Structure formats: C-alpha cells, structure tokens
Amino acid sequence: MKRRINKSERKFQSAGRLPKPKDLNEHARSQWTWTKMGLLLMCVLSATIPILMHLFSDYVDLSQPSDIGLNHTINIYLKPEEGVRVGVWHTVPEHRWKEAQGQNLEWYEKALGDGSPIFIYLHGNGGNRSAPHRIGIANVLSAVGYHVLALDYRGFGDSTGEPTESGLSTDALYLYNWVKARSGNSLVCVWGHSLGSGVTTNTAVKLLEEGKQFDGIILEGAFLTGEVAPNQLFEHAFSWFYWKFPYIQFFLFNPLKNNIVVFPTNKNLQKIRTPIMILHAEDDHLVPFASAQEIYRIAKKAQNSDERVKLVPFDGSLGYLHNGLYKDPGLPNIIREFLQSLKA
C-alpha cells in the first residue's frame, strides 16, 4: 500500500530528500511563529490606529473647516456660560453650497430660517467634530437637504472649560436655544451618537422642564447607563470587556475620565414624548445591540406608540460596528422618512 505524501513532504522531495520528523516539527513551529506574529501585529494595529487618529485630529485647525474640504461649513464659537467657549460647525444643505462660498456668519445664521430641517449633532466620546465618521453623518444630512450644527462640548476639541455631565447638557441646551432664535418655523431635531445619546436625553428632559422639546430625536449606537443583563451574550470577542467594566470606552483620550457620569437614559426615556428613531448596528463592538432593544422597549412603553418610536437595525454582516452607519446607502431614505413622519 502506497503512503500518501503531503505538501510538506513534496517540498522536501523537490529538494532531493524526504523530510525527517525533526524537519516537520521545525516547519510546524515556523508556521506557528508566523501566526503569532500576525496576531500580534493585529493587536498592535488595533491599539495604534485610534492613537494615530487622535493625534491627527489634534492637528486639524477646527476654526477652518474648509481646510479639510468642508466648503459649505462655517465655524462658530458660542459662550453658554461665563468662562466657557464651545466650537460648533454649521453645515448648510448641500444644494446651497454654491451660495455658501465666501459667506460670513451673518449669512449662515440667516440661512437657518430657510425652512430646511435642522439637526443638532451631539457626538460620542473622545476626539472632536472633525472625526471622519462625524463628518460622514454631517455630509449625509446635508445631502438630504438639512442644516447640521456639530457641537464640541466643553473640554472637547478646541472648546474650553471642564467637561462634566451637567456641563455637556448645558452646552447642548444653549445651542438649541441659539438655533431656535434663528430658525423660524423649521424643524429642529437632535442626533445623539454613543455618549451623545446620553447628552441628548438629558437635554430633552431639561427642555421639557422649560416647556420645550426637540421636534425629533435620533439615537445612534446609544447606551443605556452602561449596564446590561449579566447573562446576555454578544458576538464580538471583546464586548464582554467593555461591559464588564462600564464606560471603559470613555477612558481612552477621554476628557470626562476624571468626572463621574451617570446619563440616566432609561429614566429620561420614561419622560420624553418626542418621536424617537433608534439606529444601531447589530455588530456594534462597543454598545451591544441589546442596549438598543432595551431603549426601544422603554421608549415604546412610555409613549405607548409603534409610530412615534422606531428601531432600525443594521445587519452585522455589513461591518459598520460602532461608528460606520454613515456608510449605509439606505440611510438617507431612512432619515428622510423619519422627518416626513414628523410633519404628518
């Protein structure tokens, strides 16, 4: 009976000899070494890419959005409190980009009253308003025909002041009032991503206390007070780490790391009566999809309506993770339909 020759043996046969057991062992060890090196390289890249992105964002002159290709965006500085200055980018609807060339702040402020819906964008933790995925959302909203005001909270980006949970909500509330004073009858909505979802619901409750409210709320990658059921399993290999240590994602380049944050989204949702759309990737590696499902359950129960609260999942096979929803080709229509429902 002839013995089958494997690939390793053919390699040695071509060199004129059959492999010895020692040769095969060395070959296997070599393959394992390369595998370990590959895994190590992946870990190093996973750790260094966020660092490089953070360092790169520090070199962006946030006062000049046109330097990074935002040709229908102006930079604004507002003062929500004494000693606090926050930076904001105002991007006008894409169809007005030609008009916007060379225009000053007065023109942009007046443009807010042109009847187009307006979104206040409250970003996630770390970095600033120039992060690629944040610009991506602003570009999507602008392309659909909306104004976007992207805020860097106090202590983020080039905004001054000490970041605290109440301070972040104060900044968002001030921006809302600033916009409303210039927007006429235009819809004013808010888009909160990740950490921004907590700021959004806090701000929405503060508005209710003043007899006001957002016209619509979009929550993307929203967390629920950093907690999750202990018996819940997640697909991503590192999800257990983020949720075993609540808010761990907030400690890398995190202005809030020295302050206690709560963001009681669950309690806030029980008070809010504004239409809400929840967007969440099923493969989100920082905030598990279970968080979105629980937010949906709480909000739907509070508003007792299938129409006023929507959950839009994005299939995990798309690979959007925590920051990639802006890439989805169907997102513009999803947003457009939500805004149309607000006018009904």
Image (tube, rainbow, N blue to C red):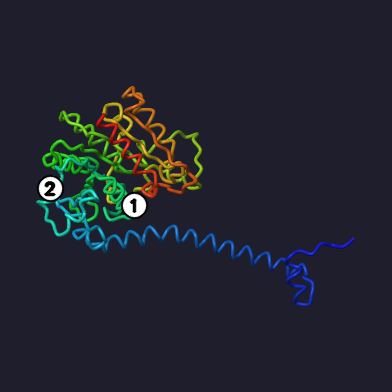
For the point 54% across and 59% down, the residue is 39
Q: How many marks?
A: 2
Q: Is residue 315 above or below residue 267?
A: below
Mark 2 burial class by Cα count in 10 Å: few <14, some 14-19, many 20+:
some
**Could you tell me which quadrant the N terminus lies in?**
bottom right
Q: Is residue 148 left or right of residue 193?
A: left
| Distance of label 1 from label 2 (alpha carbons) | 25 Å
**Could you tell me which quadrant the C terminus lies in?**
top left
| Residue 105 pos. (x, y %) | 11, 53
Residue 26 disc label: none
For the point 20% across and 32% down, the residue is 213
Q: Is residue 235 above or below residue 91?
A: above
The label nearer to you, 1 versus 2, is 2
- What amino acid is labelled 2 in the image? Glu
Name the residue beneath numbered marker 2.
Answer: 109
| Residue 220 pos. (x, y %) | 35, 41
Q: Which residue lies most toward the top here? A: 304
| Residue 40 pos. (x, y %) | 52, 61
Q: Is residue 41 left or right of residue 134?
A: right
State the image quarter where residue 58 is shown. bottom left
State the image quarter where residue 262 is shown. top left
| Residue 211 pos. (x, y %) | 16, 28
State the image quarter where residue 266 is shown. top left
Give the mark, 1 or 2, whose residue is nearer the N terminus: 2
Name the residue beneath numbered marker 1.
Answer: 133
Secondary structure, mark 1, is: helix
Of 73 and 332, the residue lying toward us: 332
Secondary structure, mark 2, is: helix
Of 242 and 290, the residue lying toward us: 290
